[in-house]
Amino acid sequence: MDPSCCGGKTVLLMACSGGSNVGQLANEVARQLTLDGNGAMFCLAGVGGHVEGIVAKTKDADQVIVIDGCSVACAKKCMDLAGCTDYTWVDLTEAGIEKNSNLELQPEQIATARAAVEAVL
């Protein structure tokens, strides 16, 4: 998917994919927004691994949204450690979603998570 959207603006979505409901919600919301043309999922593992081209593209984006499932903030920490600090951070537990180990995503939680991210687009 082309990351250029929204009037030619490059919007990258960096999602936690942790082993909890909120980690999987972060990933699902990034996936949905990408499919809808509201941005493009990008490689958080590449940023965390300090892959030069991925870090450079992240730093060059017009807007970067980092979606963490919870306040542990793994995605945010990956970005910061790689020197990618110009981003908007969303913590899905701050949107009222309780973290648990149930990986069966609930439609109402997907909607809540998506609304939290869309609010910063």
Image (spheres, helix red, strand yellow):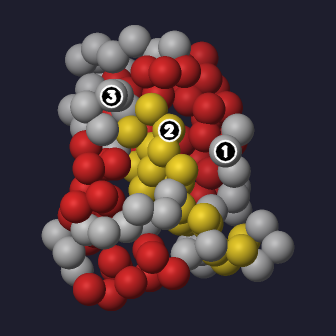
Q: Which residue is mark 2?
A: 90
Which residue corresponds to the image point at 55% horizontal and 75% vertical from the top-left?
61
Kind of element beneath mark 1: loop
Tell me, yes or no, if residue 52 can be seen here.
yes
Whole-number angstrom distance, CA of label 3 to CA of label 1: 18 Å
x, y percentage for residue 26? 44, 39
Instruction: Name the foreground residue: 83 vs 20.
Output: 83
The amino acid sitting under disc 1 is Val
Which residue corresponds to the image point at 20% horizontal and 75% vertical from the top-left?
50
Q: Which residue is mark 3?
A: 71
Whole-number angstrom distance, CA of label 2 to CA of label 3: 9 Å
The picture quadrant where one finds residue 51 is bottom left
- Locate residue 86 relative to residue 98 in the image: left or right: right
x, y percentage for residue 117? 61, 40
The picture quadrant where one finds residue 105 is top left
x, y percentage for residue 89? 48, 44
Which residue corresponds to the image point at 26% horizontal and 50% vertical from the top-left?
77
Check residue 120 in the rendering and tell me which mark sits there, or answer none: 1
